[in-house]
Amino acid sequence: MTIARALTIAGSDSGGGAGIQADLKTFQELRAFGMSAITAVTAQNTLGVHGIYPLSTEAVAQQIDAIGEDLGADAVKTGMLFSSEIIVCVAEKLQQYKWEKVVVDPVMIAKGGAALLLNESIRALKQSLLPLAYVVTPNIPEAEILTDMQIVTMEDRKEAARKLAAYGAKHVVMKGGHDPAGADEIVDLLYDGRDFYEFRSERQETRHTHGTGCTFAAAITAELAKGHSVLEAVPVAKAFIQAAIEDSLHLGLGHGPTNHWAYRERRSSR
Ligand SMILES: Nc1ncnc2c1ncn2[C@@H]1O[C@H](COP(=O)(O)OP(=O)(O)OP(=O)(O)O)[C@@H](O)[C@H]1O
Ligand SMILES: Cc1ncc(CO)c(N)n1
C-alpha cells in the first residue's frame, strides 16, 4: 500500500482551529500521513492572538531536514511564515529536497486582525516563494496585497490570478470568502495558467470560521499527496470545508473552529 505523505510548514495555533493543528487534522481525515515543521508558536484562541513567538531559522531548517533526510513528502503546504528570514529559509529547503507539489497559503492576517506576516516580508513571499508554488491559495485581501491591485469584479480576480501566475505560481486558487458581493454564494476561482474554473457554494451564516483558509489549503495538499490533480483536489477541499463549516462545533466565545471530522462522518453515514 502506498502511503501519501503530507508536510505542513506553518505556525502553531494553541486553539486548535487553524495553523499546524488544522493542517494535521485535515491530513488525517483525508488519509494522508501528516508531518510538521513549526515556524512560530502562537498563543491563540477563538477570541484572538495573544502572543507570537517565531522560531529561529535553524530550528525551522532542522525540522524540515529531519523530514527531508528520512521520511520524505509527496506534497508540502506552507502557512504562517511570519518573517522574510523564515520565508527564504523555507524556499531554500523546498528547492534542496526538490519538492514540487507545494501549496502556498499566503497567510497574512488572523480573523481577529492580528498580523501573522510582517509587512516587510511581502516582497520575500513574492520573490522567493511564489515561483516555487504549485498552487497558491490567497483570499481576496491577500491577492490584492500580492498583486498591488484592487479586486472588486470577477474580471479583477482573473487579472490578479494572471499576475500571480506570472510571478511563477503554477495554479492559483483565489478564495471568495471575503467577496462583499457574494452575499449568498461563495465563488472560489481556479486558474491553471490557461483556463479558469469556478467552484460555487452556499455561504453559511456563521461566525465559526476560524481556520477555514488553512483547512481548505490542507485538504488540497492531502489530495495532491495522494496523486490527484489540482482540478480533482479543489472540489474535494471545497466539500471538506463546506461540511466542516456546516456541522459547526460551537466551541469558544469568538470565531470558533470548524469541524474537521464532519466530511468523513457524512461519507461514512451515506
Ligand atoms: N461562511 C462561509 N460559508 C461557506 N464557505 C465558506 C465560508 N467562509 C469561507 N468559506 C470557504 O472556506 C474556504 C476559505 O475561504 P476564506 O476566503 O474564508 O479563506 P481565508 O480568509 O484564507 O480563511 P482564514 O481566515 O482562515 O485565513 C473557501 O473555500 C471558502 O469558499
Ligand atoms: C498559526 C495560524 N496560522 C494561520 C492562521 C490563519 O487562520 C491563524 N489564525 N493562525
Image (spheres, rainbow, N blue to C red):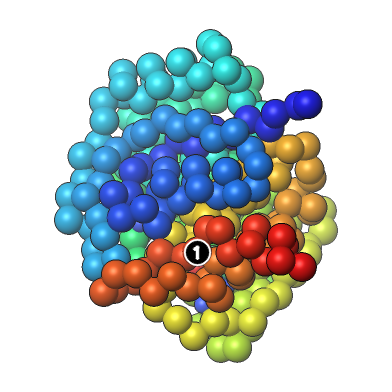
Q: Name the foreground residue: 201 vs 141.
A: 201
In the image, residue 104 sits, relative to residue 210, either above or below, namely above
> At x 55% / y 66%, what residue is drawn?
244
Residue ranking furthest to the top: 69
Q: Name the foreground residue: 93 vs 59.
A: 59
Relative image position of residue 39 (x, y in whole percent): 34, 35
Q: Is mark 1 within 8 Å of ligand 1?
A: no
In the image, residue 197 sits, relative to residue 167, either above or below, namely below
Relative image position of residue 209 (x, y in whole percent): 44, 70
> At x 71% / y 60%, what residue is drawn?
268
Q: Residues within 10 Å of mark 1 (few under 14, many from 20)?
A: many
Q: Is residue 192 left or right of residue 178?
A: right
Residue ranking furthest to the front: 269
Image quarter in which the N terminus is found: top right
Relative image position of residue 177 (x, y in whole percent): 53, 72
Element carrying mark 1: loop
| Residue type beneath disc 1 | Asn
Q: Is residue 11 left or right of residue 105?
A: left
Question: What residue does disc 1 label?
Answer: 259
